[in-house]
């Protein structure tokens, strides 16, 4: 809603991003980020997906020069303590982890060359 309104009002006034940035005192990149289209899924619209020793559900996706997916992940009980790595992400993926409760052990992926 905010993204659509910022862009709509800016275009109605015939302002470029650069001009709006100058008039508002905000960085052009900040305004550009505000105008990004975002799709949000409500809690009752999503389901948890099981991936071995963890479950995840998509919270939202932001589409710009790439796709940014925000997910909620919960680690499942692993009585054997085996755990193990998750599937690798596509090249160029940037991952941020925020631990709400408990402990997570993370290690960067190793380069694999064939």
Image (cartoon, grey):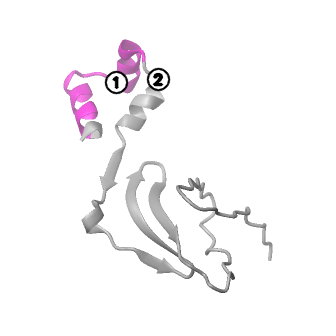
Q: Residue at x 29, y 62 (%)?
A: 43
Q: Identify the magenta region.
A: 4-25
List x then y, in percent, for residue 111.
Answer: 78, 67
Q: Is residue 28 above or below residue 67?
A: above
Q: For mark 1, does the 10 Å Cα neighbourhood hold few (<14), some (14 to 19), or many (20 or more) residues?
A: few
Q: Dividing the picture into quarters, in which one does residue 44 lie?
A: bottom left
**Front-most of residues 60 and 99:** 99
Q: CA distance from mark 1 to mark 2?
A: 13 Å
List x then y, in percent, for residue 70.
Answer: 45, 56
Q: Is residue 27 above or below residue 53?
A: above
Provide the secondary structure element on which disc 1 rests: loop
**Front-most of residues 10 and 54:** 54
Q: Residue furthest bottom?
A: 80
List x then y, in percent, for residue 56.
Answer: 46, 70
Majority SS type along the magenta span: helix
Side (left or right) of 112 relative to 31: right
Q: Residue at x 52, y 55 (%)?
A: 100
Judge depth for marks 1 and 2 and give the one in front. 2
Side (left or right) of 4 relative to 71: left
Q: Which residue is mark 2?
A: 27
Q: Quadrant of the C terminus?
A: bottom right
Dot placed on the residue nearer the N-terminal end, 1 or 2: 1
Magenta-colored stretch includes residue 20: yes
List x then y, in percent, for residue 15.
Answer: 29, 21
Q: Residue at x 45, y 62 (%)?
A: 72
Provide the secondary structure element on which disc 2 rests: loop
Q: Residue at x 34, y 49 (%)?
A: 38
Q: For mark 2, does the 10 Å Cα neighbourhood hold few (<14), some (14 to 19), or many (20 or more) residues?
A: some
Q: Which residue is mark 1?
A: 16
């Amino acid at each position: 809603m905010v993204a659509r309104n910022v862009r709509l009002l800016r275009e109605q006034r015939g302002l470029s991003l650069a001009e709006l940035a100058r008039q508002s005192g905000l960085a052009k990149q900040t305004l550009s980020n505000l105008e990004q289209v975002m799709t949000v899924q409500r809690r009752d619209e999503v389901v948890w997906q099981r991936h071995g020793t963890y479950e995840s559900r998509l919270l939202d996706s932001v589409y710009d020069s790439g796709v940014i997916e925000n997910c909620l992940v919960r680690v499942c009980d692993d009585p054997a303590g085996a755990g193990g790595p998750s599937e690798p992400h596509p090249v160029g993926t940037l991952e941020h982890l925020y631990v709400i409760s408990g402990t997570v052990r993370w290690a960067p992926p190793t380069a694999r060359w064939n």
